Amino acid sequence: MPVYQAFFGLAVEVEQVSRAWRSDFRWLRAQALRASESVCANMAEGFYSQYSTEYLQALYRCRREAQETLSHLRYAMSVKQLPEDAGTIITARYVTALKQLANLITSIERKIQQRGKSKPA
């Protein structure tokens, strides 16, 4: 799924760019890593759920975690741990992926209204 692939790539990128952060910002790195990895994990977990409503709830969690990651990245930029150019690129990619996620959420909500909460067999 393209939106999963986008967030997975972003999680790997967050891991790579955060390696250079100073040790006194280890807490920020840990927070950013957990949030970015959580997006992919929640999406995978939700995809394999029994009901569309469970999948939708997982996608809402993904959105929250992605927004949290954006907050950590913006903070890292403001305290000069993440270079401005790299930070601008990765945050723009997060915004694009969040738009893809919003479209997926809208699609799932529409299917629930049309077919009910069960996933098609």
Image: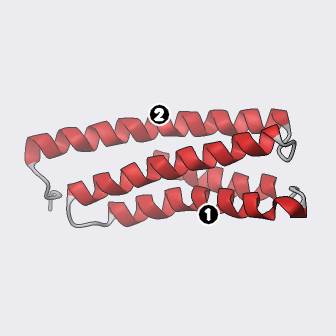
x and y, in percent, of residue 37 in the image: 58, 61
Closer-to-camera residue (18/7): 18
Amino acid at pointer 2: Lys
Quadrant for the C terminus in the image: bottom left
Amino acid at pointer 1: Arg
- Horizontal arrangement in the rendering, residue 46 relative to residue 39 (left or right): left
Q: Determine the image quadrant of residue 11.
A: bottom right
- Horizontal arrangement in the rendering, residue 76 relative to residue 21 (left or right): left
The residue tagged with tag 2: helix, strand or loop? helix
Q: Determine the image quadrant of residue 44.
A: bottom left
Q: Residue at x 90, y 58 (%)?
A: 22
Image marks 1 and 2: residues in contact by CB distance under 8 Å: no
x and y, in percent, of residue 105 in the image: 33, 42
x and y, in percent, of residue 102 in the image: 40, 37
Q: Residue at x 36, y 57 (%)?
A: 58
- Horizontal arrangement in the rendering, residue 21 relative to residue 39 (left or right): right
Q: Could one spot residue 6 in this view of the protein? A: no
Residue 115 vertical placement versus 110 (above, below) = below
Residue under label 1, please give it. Answer: 34
x and y, in percent, of residue 2 in the image: 48, 46
The residue tagged with tag 1: helix, strand or loop? helix
Residue 86 vertical placement versus 13 (above, below) = above
Q: Could one spot residue 51 in this view of the protein? A: yes
Q: Residue at x 15, y 57 (%)?
A: 120
Q: Residue at x 71, y 64 (%)?
A: 30
Q: Residues within 10 Å of mark 2 (few under 14, many from 20)?
A: some
Residue under label 2, please give it. Answer: 99
Q: Earlier in the sequence, mark 1 or mark 2?
A: 1
Q: Residues within 10 Å of mark 1 (few under 14, many from 20)?
A: some
CA gap between label 1 and label 2 equals 21 Å
